[in-house]
Amino acid sequence: MSLDGFDVKLLAAIQEKGDITLGELAEKVCLSSSQCSRRLQRLREEGYVSRVTALLSPQKLGFSLKSYVVVTLRSHAAEHTSEFSGFVQSSPQILECCMLTGDADYMLKVVAADLKAFDHFVQGLLRLPCIATVRSSLVLRDLKETTDLPLPL
């Protein structure tokens, strides 16, 4: 299915404010509430909207440290990738994990309360037999941080 102008406006509006009411949404995109509801349902069913969630403040919740951790596995054998995947899935401080091309295998986006908590996390990672190398970079300042995808206009 291709998106029309109203679909793009709906996606932009809910991306900007996930808790927008149906009435506010209808007014914003110049459609009736029932049309908005039907279109939103279709966009969800077709996978354009995977979920609606709240963005919480890491700082307010005590996560003052953010880091990017680059990991290289000893090998790509099934037991190593499975062990690493299990660690990633069971570690709530890992916000993102991406498999990479190039010199390293994975990049993790990690939050921690402080350097001591981050060190504890890294030591746990290094104890995994599947890990060959770990390199980390602490974030000093965010220049841009968004979850908004660029939409066709």
Image (tube, rainbow, N blue to C red):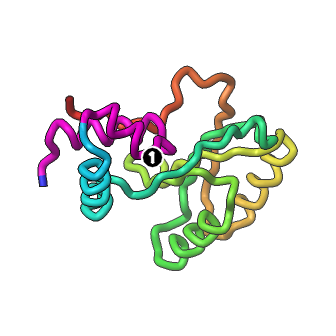
Placement of 130 over or under 153, stated as above or below? below
First to last magenta residue range: 2-30
In the displayed structure image, the side of residue 109 where residue 118 appears, left or right:
right
x, y percent for residue 21: 46, 44
- Magenta: main secondary structure equals helix
Instruction: Name the residue at 44% across, 34% down.
Output: 16
x, y percent for residue 48: 29, 53
In the displayed structure image, the side of residue 16 where residue 83 appears, left or right:
right
In the displayed structure image, the side of residue 88 where residue 7 appears, left or right:
left
How dense is the environment of label 1, judged by Cα within 10 Å: few (below 14), some, or many (20 and up)?
Answer: few
In the displayed structure image, the side of residue 96 where residue 138 appears, left or right:
right
The C terminus lies in which quarter of the figure? top left
Task: Identify which residue, 26 or 59, lies in the foreground.
Answer: 26
The amino acid at mark 1 is Asp
The N terminus lies in which quarter of the figure? bottom left
| In magenta segment, residue 84 | no
Q: Which residue is mark 1?
A: 103
Task: Identify which residue, 125 or 133, lies in the foreground.
Answer: 125
Instruction: Name the residue at 47% across, 54% down.
Output: 105
Task: Identify which residue, 77 or 40, lies in the foreground.
Answer: 40
Task: Identify which residue, 64 or 106, lies in the foreground.
Answer: 64
Instruction: Name the residue at 45% across, 46% down.
Output: 103
Placement of 46 over or under 34, stated as above or below? below
> On the image, which quarter does residue 50 sit in?
bottom left
x, y percent for residue 47: 30, 60
Instruction: Name the residue at 26% across, 43% down.
Output: 32
> On the image, which quarter does residue 109 sit in?
top right
| In magenta segment, residue 27 | yes
x, y percent for residue 76: 46, 68
